[in-house]
Every structure is written in structure tokens, then in C-alpha cells.
Amino acid sequence: MLKEIRNVRQEHGAGRRRWFESEGFELVVWHDAAGDCEGFQVCYDLGRGEHALTWRPKLGFAHNRIDQGDDSLRGNKMTPILVPAGVVPWSQIVRLFGERGVGLESGLREWVSARLAARK
């Protein structure tokens, strides 16, 4: 079940960001200044080839792999970045969110579920 991380660092001048996690799965939700949801990101397969599915109202969905920035040749660790990924495993993401999102407040759970179902 997703548990909210408290005291999440907020970006100056932006709305509010909420972050939820469970084993191998995370949900980040962005709220505008009025408190309305304005986007979300689901991160899955954490620890095993991480991916992120991000939704924003004007852009729709973006699916990325999380490149951890490992440089094994030099032993350096760089900042993780999002790089384009292939086909979205919709059924896996919908199933994981359905299982893990049970404890979220109903309005937030339904809002994310509706966007995942619409896939737009």
C-alpha cells in the first residue's frame, strides 16, 4: 500500500508536491496553488530497471526509463535522468496502482485512475 512521505521538499514558486511510496512503486502528485491536481508520475520496477510514467494536462503521457547515471568505467555517479522508453505496460501499471493505491484518499485515487484508464 502507498504511504505518503511527509516533509517533501517543495519547489519555490510552484504548487505543492506530494510523494507516496511502497515497495518497488512510487507516486508523485503535483497540485496547483488552489490545491487541484495538475499532474502525476508513477515510478515502477524500482530497483530493477526503473521506469516513470508522467501525465501532464497539456502534454498527456510520457514514458521514460530512469538512467541512474552510473559510470562504471570511471566509478562516477551522476544525476539520474529520464530517457525515452518503449511501449508502456498499461496493464501492469493499472494493476499495480489498483493494488497499491487502495489506501489513498478516494478523490486522489479516482483522479489518477481516470487518467490511467483514459490513456490520454
Image: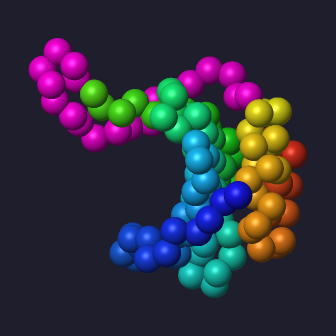
Residue beneath the point at 82% across and 33% down:
91
Image location (x, y in percent) of residue 52:
57, 40
Residue beneath the point at 76% across and 58% down:
101
Q: In this view, does 2 lie above or below 47?
A: below
Q: Is residue 8 above or below residue 118?
A: below
> In what quadrant of the picture does the C terminus appear?
top right
Residue beneath the point at 80% across and 50% down:
99
- What is the residue that sits farthest to the bottom in this orientation? 34
Visible in this render: residue 41?
A: no
Instruction: Write down the region rendered in magenta.
Output: 71-89
- Which quarter of the picture shows residue 119? top right
Visible in this render: residue 90?
A: yes
- What is the residue that sits farthest to the left in this orientation? 74
- Which quarter of the picture shows residue 4? bottom right
Q: In this view, does 35 lie to the left or right of 91?
A: left
Q: In this figure, what is the number of numbered marks?
A: 0
Residue beneath the point at 53% across and 38% down:
46
Which colour style is shown?
rainbow
Please check the rendered image and state whether residue 72 is part of the magenta-colored stretch, yes or no: yes
Q: In this view, does 39 lie above or below 8?
A: above
Q: Which of 23 and 110 is in front in this view?
A: 23
> In what quadrant of the picture does the N terminus appear?
bottom right
Image location (x, y in percent) of residue 115:
80, 52
Magenta: main secondary structure: loop
Q: Is residue 120 above or below residue 12?
A: above
- Which quarter of the picture shows residue 88? top right
Image location (x, y in percent) of residue 106:
83, 71
Please check the rendered image and state whether residue 14 is part of the magenta-colored stretch, yes or no: no
